[in-house]
Amino acid sequence: MKNILAFSGSNSPDSINEKLIQSVIERYPEYDINLIDLKQFEAPIYSPSIQAKGIPKPIQDLYAIFQESDGFIIASPEHNGLPTAFLKNTFDWLSAFTQQFFGEKPVLLLSTSPGATGAQTQLALLEKLIPIWGGIVKARYSLGSFNENFDTNYNTITNKAELQLLDKALFAFAEAEYEPKKTNAEVVQSYFDAFQKGDLDGVLDVFHPDCYIVSVKEEERLKEQLHGIYRTRKEARQFLRNIVSLFETKEFIVDTVLEAGDNLVVAKGTFSHLVRSSGKLFNSNWVQLCVVEDEMIKEYRFYEDSAALIEASNIEYA
Ligand SMILES: Cc1cc2nc3c(=O)[nH]c(=O)nc-3n(C[C@H](O)[C@H](O)[C@H](O)COP(=O)(O)O)c2cc1C
């Protein structure tokens, strides 16, 4: 992983948690770890009335650094069983930009204290809270009895078993690749890409396991009937089978994929299907409406010229 941002949650000038981070930087020179001092980004205790006048400049600068970083190492001291008020205040301010201010990136949690527990109580709480702020906790490590287990002259943990635990945590974190989240439009585009390649498993992967599909008519349908409602990814497979058994697609053009707010993505285009039963071409404009959830299509509605399908299928209506 490149560009790792590290900081301690302490505002003490002699922070032992910051020393722990420094020892990590020296032990793993192969990782690009940028240690910052949160005291340089200090802000008043959060208050909505201060926020109304504008987010303090140091916090704006810190948020910009967060956005540029690919992962985070946080060494968090314990004050009365909790993370420090200083750290919490910094996080409160960052959440004024967005609650998910860690941006779905990996986080390594560290802590130490002079006591035997190594500030684990607060670290367990932080592990639960970080995902609420958009961080993905990859590993955590606590060093107990700092004064017995750490040599401040050489800036290193002296206990071999502890070093092994630290190595394991570091590896789990640093080898985790940050994959940027797909936008909703990219999710729908990936559906079309898989469809164009004839990769039906790839198409199915884009459907949410609990998806709701409307093919032209919002009505219950017989198993092999194309138009109607399909529920769950299992029925999505039936939907794709029905398309393939009815048509041989000659052309499928996507001209527009647009985000329309509220996780809705609108797409439109044209297609030309050969209707297998009649040998005639079914040409149509189409519109597709998708609601995207967790990078998958949760709700899918596809509209085409069904009158043209009737004509191309040689179906006669009285
Ligand atoms: C107000 C206060 C409360 C503390 N509460 C705890 C605690 O609950 N558990 C603990 O292990 N250490 C506790 N400590 C001791 C800290 O672990 C110790 O001060 C440590 O050096 C803090 O880390 P830092 O040097 O990185 O700031 C507390 C210290 C203070 C000042």
Image: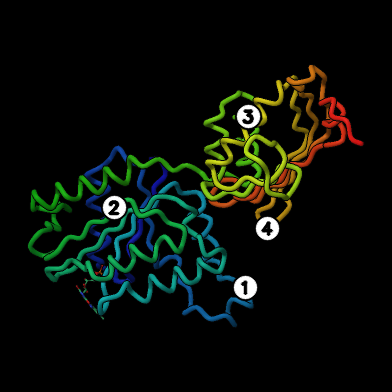
Instruction: Name the residue type under label 3.
Output: Phe
Ligand 1 sits in quadrant: bottom left
Question: Which residue is at 58% across, 70% downward?
Answer: 55
Tag 4 secondary structure: loop
Q: Earlier in the sequence, mark 3 or mark 1?
A: 1
Residue at image mark 1: 54
Q: Nearer the viewer, residue 257 or 202?
A: 202
Relative to 25, residue 248 above or below: above
Q: Is mark 4 within 8 Å of ligand 1?
A: no
Residue at image mark 3: 195
Question: Which residue is at 27% across, 61% downward?
Answer: 18
Circle 3 packing at 10 Å, graded few (<14), some (14-19), many (20+), is: some
Separation of residues labelled 3 and 4 (CA atoms): 25 Å
Q: Is residue 219 left or right of residue 71?
A: right
The N terminus sits in image quarter: top left
Question: Which residue is at 32% across, 46% downward?
Answer: 173
Which one is closest to the eye, mark 4 or mark 1?
Answer: 4
Residue at image mark 4: 262
Separation of residues labelled 4 and 1 (CA atoms): 27 Å
Picture coordinates of residue 172, whole percent (x, y): 28, 45
Instruction: Name the residue type under label 2.
Output: Ala
Circle 4 packing at 10 Å, graded few (<14), some (14-19), many (20+), is: few
Tag 4 near tag 2, CB within 8 Å: no
Q: Is mark 1 within 8 Å of ligand 1?
A: no
Tag 2 secondary structure: strand
Picture coordinates of residue 121, whole percent (x, y): 24, 70
Most extreme residue toward the front, as rendered? 318
Tag 1 secondary structure: loop
Instruction: Name the residue type under label 1.
Output: Gly
- Which quadrant of the structure image shows residue 112? bottom left
Which one is closest to the eye, mark 3 or mark 4?
Answer: 3
Which disc is residue 139 wearing? 2
